[in-house]
Amino acid sequence: MQENEGILWKKANEMFGKPRQQWKTVDEMIYGVDNYYNTAKDSYKIRNKSIIEAFDFHYKNNLFYNQFCKHRKLSPSNIKSENDFHKIPMIPDSFFKDYPSENPMDVYNWLYQVSSVEIGKFDFKGKKLQNFLEWAERRLKGIVLHSSGTSGKFSIMFRDSDTMKRLFHILIKLVMFHITKPVSDDIHFVYPGTPKTYLAMGHALGTASQIFDDEHKHFLTDRSLNMEIVRLMSSGKAEGLKQKLELALLIKAMAKGQYTLLNLLQNLEKNKKQIVLISFPFQVWDLMDIMDKKGIKFNLGDTNSFMATAGGWKIYSHKKVTEEEFARRVEKMFGIPKENYRDAYGMSEMNGLALSCEERYKHLTDWIYPMVLDDEMEPLGFGEWGRFAFLDPAGYGYPGFIMSGDKVRLLEKCPKCNKTGIVLDSEIKRIGGAEARGCGNLMRNLLAEKLTS
């Protein structure tokens, strides 16, 4: 595969690679495979071994998860093969917002209980959660991401150094080298957002973009997007003059940035540069609305440019269109062929992406063990709709055994292409009523016992 050559891949490997002698079993699937969608038929054996190893690690190193498993009367001795995987206690994605308050000391105590890696003593001197996240990221030598906080509270994901390296190796390999080829070392990276944030998409792309030099990466704005502003944007309610001014300045900067971005794309097209544009689908849709009004169109397919979207439509679900309709409009407005546009499904808690194929089925990577659960949290078969859950052995900062709030359908193989792996139907919805019934309260009670004992 092409990433074994070229400056970009060498930079990615220098920043996010691991010497083979330091690999765990899961790393054989992440670092040892060139094409994630053309893998050996027996790759499930490595995946299964990886999951058993990861479960053993979290059971022994995570104070909370150890108690959670004991409450279920489960230990590593009960998990011997894939037939036992349905027994592995899973945590709901809402768990990542179950810290008691935004007081840094409270968040530290929560993190100390739920982390599977050592975080050391609390010596943070500030009062703001935003600054605490910076401290935690330095302490872990990894990365900290938070959600958009649309429910009123942020989900916070803390990754250690090894998990962070895996995550960015995966993201770069999938997005940069699994959509089209060739990918030029002169390619320009474009993200219609800011990298100066801990918000999941922006912070992740800002970190991944470090493989590009400054001349080859472009953002909508360089203004910081702190947690207060993110919450403000999610709620739309500004309190006080300072918040109103901050929100107004950010909205103005981003509106101006959209036109600057269009000028940038025109210049890159004129100079025949290959481009990779990554964004939320609703941001690209809004950009195409502006292009429509201004009569702007591009022919970026002439340079084999490509586009990836991720993160869903968020609060803009009323604008949502099918992926096929989206791809047609991208081709019409940007001149990017439909096969060079892909949408990805992924959760901030998951170390991987399900990247859509040309036929719009989302392909999971081999180390992820996916499940669909019914209302009683029991596994369903392929082809049935239910709650998406997964076992992710790539994460060592926290247990990657997670139930989502998404309604999906799993297929054992893609009905349209010959890529390997289990796929998700392209139609993914949120389940009304959020978290898994009963599980959240049980976990909060267990955590409360640990924090007060």
Image (cartoon, helix red, strand yellow):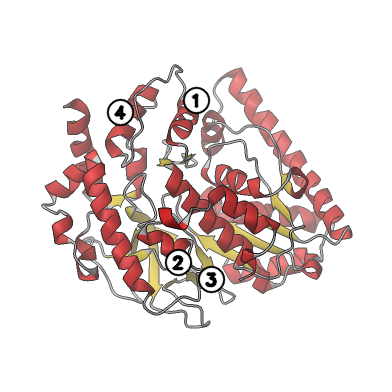
Residue 410 vertical placement versus 196 (above, below): below
Nearer to me, 151 or 265: 265
Q: What residue is at 52 percent from the left and 48 percent from the top?
A: 315
Quadrant where the N terminus sits is: bottom right
- Give the labeled residue for mark 3: 35
Question: What distance separates the C-alpha of mark 1 from that of mark 4?
Answer: 16 Å
Residue most extreme to the front: 21
Nearer to me, 431 or 346: 346
Quadrant where the C terminus sits is: top left
Dot 1: within a 10 Å radius of its alpha carbon, few (fewer than 14), some, or many (20 or more) residues? some
- Give the labeled residue for mark 4: 109
Q: What residue is at 13 percent from the left and 51 percent from the top?
A: 72
Residue 396 vertical placement versus 381 (above, below): above
- Residue 122 in the figure: left or right of residue 83: right
- Where is residue 310? Give x, y as percent: 56, 56
What amino acid type should be assigned to the residue bearing mark 2? Thr
Q: Could you tell me if residue 103 is visible in this image?
A: no
What amino acid type should be assigned to the residue bearing mark 1? Asn
- Give the labeled residue for mark 2: 365
Dot 4: within a 10 Å radius of its alpha carbon, few (fewer than 14), some, or many (20 or more) residues? some
- Give the labeled residue for mark 1: 131
User: Which is nearer the N-term, disc 1 or disc 2?
Assistant: 1
